Image: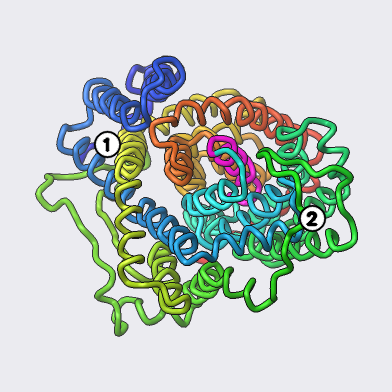
Amino acid sequence: MWQQIVDPLNNIWLSAVVAFLPILTFLLGLLVFKLKGYQAGFLTVIVASVIALFVYGMPFSLVGASFVQGFAQGMWPIAWIIIAAIFLYKLSVKSGSFEVIKQSVMSITPDHRIQVILIGFCFGSFLEGAIGFGGPVAITAALLVGLGLKPLYAAGLCLIANTAPVAFGAVGIPIIAMSNLVGVEQYAVSAMVGRMLVPLSLIVPFFIVFLMDGFKGVKETFLAILVAAVSFTATQFLSSNFLGAELPDIVSAIVSIVCTTLFLKFWKPSNIFRLDDEKDFSNQQKLEFGKIVKAWMPFILLIVCIIIWTQPWFKAFFAKGAIFDYTQITIAFNNIQGGIVDMNGKPVSLSLPINFVALQAGTAILVAAFLTIWVLKIKASDAAECFWDTLKEMAIPCITIGLVVAFAFIAKNSAMSATLGFAFAQTGNAFAFFSPVIGWIGVFLTGSDTSSNLLFGPLQQVTARELGIGEALFLAANSVGGVVGKMISPQSIAIACAAVGLVGRESDLFKFTLKYSVGFIILIGIWTFIIATMLGNIIPEIVLLAK
């Protein structure tokens, strides 16, 4: 067995500098040398592999196994979710439903600023709570492009809008998985995340409008955006504090969409803001309710499938020993002698668990797509054309995602990620500021708030105990810091570019979101420091899981 070494150079800061080199390679590749996403990803994997081999002493076979493990995880489930989501979107376009969807959104408001809030923020939050893993950005960005936004702009705005719901994404998995790992009940962590997110959830809708149209735009849409932001934030706070981690995104999104849509029945902005040349909305035809429902059917079916997929009774059919347990397989590297143990002596898994149905959001989306073909009576030849087009368009983005996740697994399995985390843990009381920064780096590295929480959750817990601060704060801070790392994650950038047809322009999108991500994480770090030093009474007590 090969044991991970957190400080291979016997100086944690020097080791951290070396561990940071693959990240620096990726940043330089995109920002300075303007490389395509897959090119920057490939170089990053090379640099990470060399450091793992010659600095951390990781055996070549384990580096290779980590690469395969990561690349496979990039394909399944991540790329599978994106392929299914884009296929569903293309079916909507092919059937003509998407034109009606555009008209239905326009009937609520033709104003692009409010449309971005309704689609990118509210509907995106619902999708994040239901499926996560990049699917929300892919679907909402494609919808906004169809509504007249430029592709790069739509992708960037959706990445920013996708911050507030990420912590509770995929039915609360980021918080639940971390809580189970560190041996605590999820409710205190969920409540703390909900409390920490209040400023961010309130600010993001206004910030998006500000990016689109400055202070003038905020002033003109203030009441509508206030309704969307307050209804979302209040519901997120209440549900996270009283219901747990599973439902905040879904419930908040539904409440916000309903409240904002009803408000817009009685209030309209004084000026209509558009990013295209469309000016005249007087001839807009009134749509029948049945026609609107039929047009939204692909996404209604998506919601129904996701709800079914999250039910315990449905998952029970695929549990071990149940009738459909053959849909779960695990691929193991049996030919590798030994394996990896972490610094605490616990084994690091190199297996590839593959669940084809029960825990696979991509399969739920694909089922929704097949139901869409049947309900909307789409010709088999047209459906096949949509699927083939999806595969062709997604080939390079899938390779990019695979390389990025492969780098993340090499960094995790070699302990490079842990090195960066432990370096920040040496900062003493200032750690309250750096606690969310660790989560931010974790999501940048892995593309997943869940992965970041699993990677750094134990470190956050131990540091909180050593500093005498309620551990719910640092566990929550890891997740909250991660939500603003999502908008610069190479995986998210690749997905967003693929969804709007900007493959090869990942560097442009990365440049668009980077400065905002850095600004947000600084504010979250300050907010965490204020809570730790001045508002300790709002930190809930952790309850340990029964052994």
* Residue most extreme to the front: 283
Vertical position of residue 410 compared to residue 287: above or below: above
Look at mark 1 in the image and give the residue it sits on.
Answer: 3
**Residue type at tag 2:** Ser
Q: Nearer the viewer, residue 474 or 129?
A: 129
Q: Earlier along the polypeptide chain: callout 1 or callout 2?
A: 1
Q: Residues within 10 Å of mark 1 (few under 14, many from 20)?
A: many
Q: Mark on residue 282? A: 2
Residue 96, percent from left and from top: 51, 64
Q: CA distance from mark 1 to mark 2?
A: 69 Å
Between residues 137 and 430, which one lies in front from this camera angle? 137
User: Range of the magenta residues?
Assistant: 151-166
- x, y percentage for residue 334? 13, 53
Left or right of 384 on screen, residue 486: right
Residue 142, magenta (yes or no): no
Asked whether 503 or 507 is in front, the reply is 503
Label 1 or label 2, whichever lies nearer to me, is 2
Prevailing secondary structure class for the magenta stretch in the rendered image: helix
Residue ID at (64%, 31%): 521
Instruction: Work out whether residue 236 can be spotted.
Output: yes
Q: Quadrant of residue 179?
A: bottom right
Q: Is residue 465 visible?
A: no
Dot 2, crowdedness within 10 Å: few (<14), some or many (≥20)? few
Image coords of residue 439 (percent x, y): 54, 38
Q: Position of residue 156 (x, y in %)?
A: 58, 37
The answer to the question of whether label 1 and label 2 lie on touching residues, with beta carbons closer than 8 A, is no
The residue type indicated by label 1 comes to: Gln
The residue depicted at 37 percent of the width and 23 percent of the height is 35
Q: Is residue 88 above or below residue 516?
A: below
Element under label 1? Answer: strand
